[in-house]
Image (tube, grey):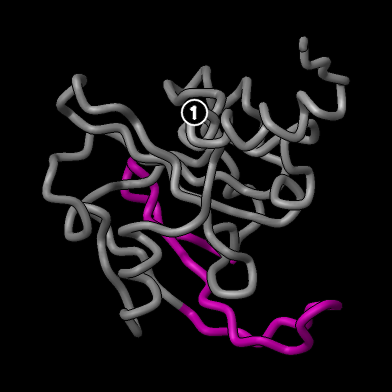
Amino acid sequence: MTQQYTAGTLKRYAAPALLPALAGCAPSTGGKITETVLSTQESFSLSEVFEEPIAEAYVFCSYADEERGEELGFDRKSFYSIDRDYMQWETNTGIGIKFRDEEKKPIVEWFNPVKINSCASPGDSYRKIDPEGPITIEIKKVEFIRYGEKEVKHLFYRDADGTEDTE
């Protein structure tokens, strides 16, 4: 007896089988920077967070363009998009790290918007920041439609050229 599969049957069995393979292809929130921000009250530097020397670091805001991220040397799959998780694309902010050791893949760490905002100043998106410079943390109350009022840690930077943030 031959078993026949419909499109629905294939989707039901094929989708879970593909999930482990797809897990590495999508951006996600959390990581070393998140842990540091949540446990730090005033300031830190990216070079304190990572053992590996950092070549460059960038800030990514909501609606970050995967093509622009790719132009800066990051994998386009490290970015949310309107086609892949539009809700995260509209709300999450993050920081991208490129290591001096070119064998180590660049990473983009995205933040839960209810906890961390890496784009506290106008014009932060795609901003190159100093990995050795201080990232200052300010806690501000933010009203969310879904979650009500939350205390969110806002990040402020020194540019790679040494220029301080101005709000």
Name the spot of residue 89 as percent of width and height, x first.
Answer: 71, 45
Task: Work out which quarter of the rendered image holds the C terminus and state it.
Answer: bottom right
Q: In the rendered image, which residue does mark 1 sit on?
A: 21
Residue at the image point whose x is 44% and y is 41% from the top: 108
Residue at the image point whose x is 49% and y is 35% from the top: 20
Name the spot of residue 3 as percent of width and height, x first.
Answer: 78, 16
> Tag 1's secondary structure?
helix
Residue 161 lies in the magenta-colored region: yes
For this rendering, which residue is in front, 33 or 122?
A: 33
Reply above or below: 10 against 111.
Answer: above
Image quarter of residue 74: top left
In the image, taking residue 123 as reference, residue 40 lies left or right, namely left
Residue 139 lies in the magenta-colored region: yes
Residue at the image point whose x is 78% and y is 83% from the top: 143
Task: Work out which quarter of the rendered image holds the N terminus and state it.
Answer: top right
Residue at the image point whose x is 79% and y is 31% from the top: 83
For this rendering, which residue is in front, 87 or 137?
A: 87
In the image, taking residue 119 as reference, residue 83 lies left or right, namely right
Total tally of numbered discs in the picture: 1
Region rendered in magenta: 138-167
In the image, taking residue 42 as reference, residue 147 lies left or right, namely right
Reply above or below: 150 against 72.
Answer: below
